[in-house]
Image (cartoon, grey):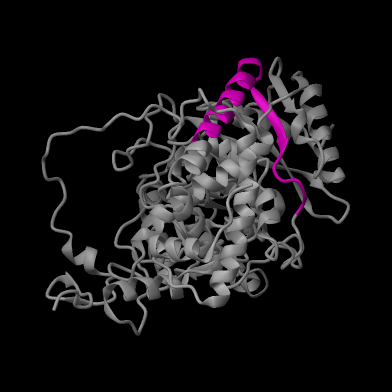
Amino acid sequence: MSEKITDETIDYVSILAKLKLNDAERSQAKEDMQRMLDYIDKLNELDTKDVEPMSHIFPIDNVFREDVVVNGDDRESMLANAPEKKEGQFKVPKTVE
Amino acid sequence: MDLMQLTAVRLSEKIKSGEVTVKEAAEASLQAIRNKEKEIHAFISIDEEGVLRQAEEVQKKIEKGEQAAGPLAGVPVAIKDNICTLGIKTTCASRILHNFVPTYDAHVVKRLKDAGAIIIGKTNMDEFAMGSTTETSAFGVTRNPANQEHVPGGSSGGSCAAVAAGEVPCSLGSDTGGSIRQPSAFCGVTGLKPTYGTVSRYGLIAYGSSLDQIGPIARDVTDCAALLQVIASHDRKDSTSVRLEDYNFMSALKDDVAGLKVGIPEDYFGEGLDQDVKERIFEAAEILKSKGARVEFFNLGMVEYAIPAYYVIASAEASSNLERFDGVKYGYRSEEYEGLHDMYKKSRTEGFGPEVKRRIMLGSFVLSSGYYDAYYLKALKTKALIKHSFETAFKKYDILLAPASPSTAPRLGASLSDPLKMYLSDIYTVSVNLAGLPGISVPCGKDSKGLPVGLQMIADCYQEKTLLKTAYTYEQNRGKK
C-alpha cells in the first residue's frame, strides 16, 4: 500500500506541476492520485533487484556534428505565436523591482 | 462514382492516369466533410483555401511528370491535430493551444507534401493525446461512424473516424499507448504503429517521448504500407530517428504466410475480454492457419504489469514535456495574474483540461525527490522485463496475434467517470509501446451489436514487412475462409 496522499503532498506537487487547483480539484486530485498509486503498487510484486532500468529501447548515441550554423535568424517565426511581445522579444510580467 | 470510397492507392492511380483531377479528389473530400461533419465531428480545422491551392500545384507537377511515381500523389490526407502543419492551426485539442499556428511543417507533413499528397485538415483527438475515447478534446467529442452513440476510440479518434466515414481515404495518427490501433479497431479501419524511431517525431507535439510514434490509418493494408513508405525516413532533427536499409514497404504486400510462426499469448484471452472479440480473433487465426501459418498458444507473461508501468512512464514524460506550456512563448495566457509565477500557474490551470492535469500531477509526483526510485525507476525496470518477455517470444514466433482492445467501442460518456477503468482498456496495446515494437490493427468482423472488432498483429522491432505481409494475407482471405 503506498503512503497516503496528504494535502501537503498535493500542495507540493502543485508547485512542481505549476498548477493552481481549487478546493474541489484538490480533493479530486488527492483521490485520483491515491487510487492510481494503489494500483501502481502492483509493480512491487516484481523482484527487480538485479534489473537494469531501461529508459530507451535501443542504444542511443550522442549525435555529433561540426558546430556550423545551418539555420537563419528565426526570430520572427519564434515570436509569431507569442501572447505578448515587445521589441523582438517575449514580454512577461516584471520579476524584479 | 464516390471518389472517397476508393482506397488512397487506387485514387492516386486514377489521378495519375488523368481520369480524375487532383482538384476533383480534393473537392470530393471537402464535400464529404461538409455532409458528415455535423454528425461525426472528426475534424478541428479544415484548410479549404490551402487545399485548393495545393491541389493546383500538385496537378501541375503531375502533368509535368514530376511526382508521378508517388503512390499518394494527389490524395487528400487528414492529419491528427498534434502534428504541426505550417500555417494551419495545431491545437492538440487543448484550450492552451487553441490559437497556435505553427511556422513549420512536421517532418511527416513535409514528406507527404513532397510526395504530392494534399493536407485536407486537422483531426480531433483526446487532449494532448491523453485518453482512449476522444471525449477529452476541448473542442467536443467525435462520434463513431459505425454507430454514433459510441465513441470512436482514442486518442486518434478523429483520424480514424474521418477515414471510416469516407471523409478522406487515409490519415495520420500518433500512438503512445495504443492511440492508433485501438481507435482503428473501434472504427473498423486499418492502423499501424511503426517500430519506435522509424518515423521522425520532429513536429509531433510530445506526450510521452520514449513511446510516441506517428503512423498511418487507412481503409486497407496496402494504403497503410503506401503511407508508411512516404512518411518513414531518417531525420537528423530527431535524435531517436533510425536509418533503415529498406523503406520499400509496399514490396511486402504478398498473399503468403506459408511457414510463418504465429504465437497467441494465452494471457491476453482471460478475464475482461468480450466473448465476441475473442471469437473473431480465433477465427482470424484459423484463416492464417489455412494459409499455411503455424499457429500456437504460448505464455507471454508480464501482461498485468504493463499498464501500471506505462502510466508511470507516460505521466512522468508528459509532466516534463508539458512544462513548455507556460503562457510565454505560444498558446493561451491567462488574462489576469499577479507576477510571473502566477501567470504560469493560471495559464496552465485555465488552459489544460482535467485528464491532462491529472497526468501532469501524477507525473510530477513520481519524478519528485523521495518517490523517484519507488515509482519511476521501478517502472523503467518493469519496462526492461516486458521488453525481455517479448524478446523471448520473438525467438519462437514471427508474429503475435492479439485483440486490439478487450471490448468494442463503448457508448459515449460511459468511460470518463472511471479513469482507471478507461486506462485498463489499453491492456493489449501499451506493452507494444513500452517495447518499441510495430503493431497493426486490422478489421476482423463485428460483434453482436454490429460494432467493428480489431485484430492486432505484433512483430519484432523493424519487422514491419513481416507485419504488413501477414496483415495483407489475412485481409485478402478474410472474406473467403
User: With respect to residue B305, does A32 lie above or below?
Assistant: below
Labels in figure, total: 0
Residue B477, position as x, y percentages in the image: 77, 32
- B371 versus A64 height, above or below: below
Foreground residue among B388 and B478: B388
Image vertical order of residue B326 relative to residue B339, above or below: above
Q: Is residue B413 visible?
A: yes
Quarter of the image with the N terminus of chain B in it: bottom right
| Horizontal arrangement in the rendering, residue B286 relative to residue B356 (left or right) | right
Which range of residues does the magenta coloring cover?
B380-408
Whether residue B176 is visible here, answered yes or no, is no
Q: Position of residue B223 (x, y in %)?
A: 58, 43
Report whether B187 appears left or right of B22.
Answer: right
Quarter of the figure that contains the C terminus of chain B: top right
Residue B22: x %, y % from top left:
47, 58
Question: Foreground residue, B127 or B203?
Answer: B127
Report whether A17 appears left or right of B447: left
Asked where in the image residue B450 lies, by quadrant, the reply is bottom right
Q: Quadrant of residue B456?
A: top right
Going 86% across and 38% down the picture, which residue do you hit?
B279
Which one is nearer the viewer's eye here, B476 or B327?
A: B327
Query: Can residue B383 be found in the magenta stretch?
Result: yes
Residue nearest the observer in this picture, A16 or B114: A16
Q: Is residue B194 magenta?
A: no
The residue most toward the bottom is: B336
Residue at 53% in and 38% down = B379
Choose top left, top right, bottom left or bottom right for residue B163: bottom right
Q: Position of residue B107 (x, y in %)?
A: 36, 48
